[in-house]
């Protein structure tokens, strides 16, 4: 995964690509919709959508600001045997931070289970989802675990 940082100079924002991947893996195929999320000022979560499996995975780790490299925690695998974000037809999520309410908003696509011909007959396929998500990292049995939950009442 390549990272582009914003450089501020006199109020102007310039994209600036770092010289090396934040994280790379030869085992995973194409990544879509990556998110790199700081959590609790302690850890970072790297969330990606795996094109081949159409499944969302996340990895917990430590980001080294000086080296611009993400180090996955031991046991937090960065391939398709890793931590799944959801076990349904949930795919291609992206998030942004709502600084006014200090919360992360997650948008995702829910794929249909029907065939393409039935989707054409229906005139629609899938559903765009929107929810507020809280990311909390805690330690359990010497491993960091991410709790992701909605703040909906």
Image: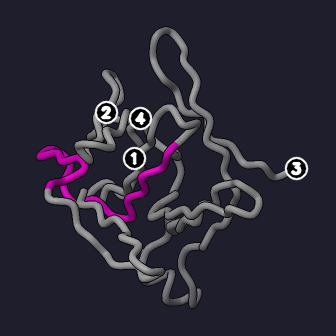
Residue under circle 2?
72
Assign a secondary structure to mark 1: strand
Image coordinates of residue 106 in percent, x first then y, are: 60, 60
Residue under circle 4?
60
Tag of residue 80: none
* Residues marked 3 and 2 touching at CB (< 8 Å): no
Residue under circle 3?
153
N-terminal-most mark, 3 or 2: 2
Few, some or many residues within 10 Å of mark 2 (<14, 14–19, 20+)? some
Assign a secondary structure to mark 3: loop
N-terminal-most mark, 4 or 2: 4
* Marks 3/2: CA–CA distance: 33 Å
Does the magenta-highlighted stretch encompass residue 60? no
**As drawn, 122 above or below 108:** below
Tag of residue 46: 1
* Residues marked 4 and 2 touching at CB (< 8 Å): yes
Q: Magenta span covers which residues?
A: 20-38
N-terminal-most mark, 1 or 2: 1
Assign a secondary structure to mark 2: strand
Q: Which residue is drawn at 38% across and 59% down?
A: 34
Does the magenta-highlighted stretch encompass residue 31? yes
Few, some or many residues within 10 Å of mark 3 (<14, 14–19, 20+)? few
């Amino acid at each position: 995964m390549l990272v582009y940082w914003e450089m501020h100079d006199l109020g102007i924002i310039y994209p600036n690509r770092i010289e090396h991947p934040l994280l790379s893996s030869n085992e995973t195929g194409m990544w879509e919709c990556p998110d790199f999320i700081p959590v609790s000022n302690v850890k970072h979560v790297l969330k990606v959508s795996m094109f081949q499996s159409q499944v969302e995975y996340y990895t917990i780790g430590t980001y080294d600001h000086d080296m611009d490299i993400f180090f996955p925690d031991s046991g937090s695998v960065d391939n398709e045997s890793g931590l799944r974000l959801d076990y349904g037809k949930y795919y291609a999520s992206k998030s942004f931070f709502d600084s006014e309410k200090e919360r992360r908003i997650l948008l995702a696509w829910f794929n249909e289970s029907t065939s393409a011909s039935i989707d054409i007959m229906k005139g629609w396929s899938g559903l765009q989802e929107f929810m507020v998500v809280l990311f909390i990292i805690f330690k359990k049995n010497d491993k960091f675990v991410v709790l992701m939950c909605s703040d909906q009442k």
